[in-house]
Image (cartoon, rainbow, N blue to C red):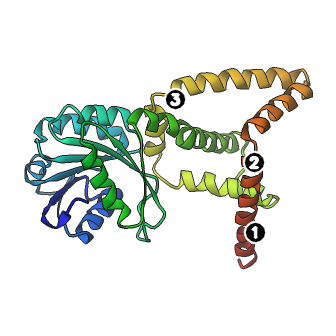
Amino acid sequence: MIDLSNKTVGVIGGKGKTGSQFARLFRKLGADVLVSDLRTRLSNEELISRSDIVVFSVPLHLSEEIIRAQVGNLKSGQIVLDVSSLKTKQVKMMNKGKAEVIGMHPLFGPTKRSFDGLTLILCPGNCRKLTSKGVGEIFKMVGMKVVEMSAEEHDKLMTVVQVVPHLKTILAGELLRHLGIHPDKSREISTPIYRLELDIIGRIFSQEGMLYSSIVAGNPNTKDLLKFLKKTVDSYLKEVETGNVKALDKRFSNVQKFLGKFSQNAFDESEQIINEMQKWMSKK
């Protein structure tokens, strides 16, 4: 494992929610931590010159621009990490510098709770296996589950892990607005599952839209996904217009076969969630 007690970690964007979380974590692990941000005296350039490990923790829609501006300042012997929801372009940009490169994606938001069981994805760029292993061990030490994959594989998986769920939720919100049905009204007659869906809609729209817009627009696979969805929705429309229930049921059966045993496992797991949710609702 990398010994942080004699290392300086510089967090660019370290005043933000995610950046400050990682700054606290590295301090707790014994590193000297430097922070630069919009209103700090310390510049990004000076931070890089004084750091052994550099972390880019900046808004996703600005990440390429900020990395591009600083990549020439990165030095041999340094490790550079970035914290963002997309990896292909970010890792490719960092690879242009002299430092060892690892893209990171924490699959959790800023939290003051324990890191136990939370997942962190590492996407090594130009770096030694020893370095990526050492960085992974740092986060495993605080209880994180570390998963390693290429930047390209990451962004492909994020198509279904992030882009599809976010698009579905945003479109559901748009539909409520279009129909003029406020969630408070539909929640009065909601099933437990629908109430959970409403909570997810509210959860997404309680946060900054630019993050979700950047995840959807920035993923290199989104365009092909939307083309597929458009084609599929057009097919559904034709089947609904002609009342072709058998065709709709055939689609359902095809997916059912593909999912296999996962469906029953997911049903059982979601039943536990619903039971806990009902207990919580009964106390309100």
Q: Which residue is mark 1?
A: 275
Q: Is residue 253 left or right of residue 160?
A: right
The span from disc 1 to disc 2 (Cα, nearest Å) is 18 Å
Q: Nearer the viewer, residue 117 or 194?
A: 117
SS class of the residue under badge 3? helix
Location of residue 243 (image quadrant): top right
Q: Nearer the viewer, residue 257 or 72?
A: 257
159 lies above or below 147: above
Q: Which residue is mark 3?
A: 222
The span from disc 2 to disc 3 (Cα, nearest Å) is 26 Å
- Can you tell which of label 2 and label 3 is closer to the viewer? 2
Q: Which residue is mark 2?
A: 263
Q: Residues within 10 Å of mark 2 (few under 14, many from 20)?
A: few
37 lies above or below 234: below
Q: Residue at x 50, y 28 (%)?
A: 221
Q: Quadrant of the C terminus?
A: bottom right
Q: Is residue 14 left or right of residue 252?
A: left
**Going from the N terminus, do you reach mark 2 or mark 3 first?**
3
Q: Is residue 199 left or right of residue 195?
A: left
Q: Residue at x 75, y 47 (%)?
A: 261
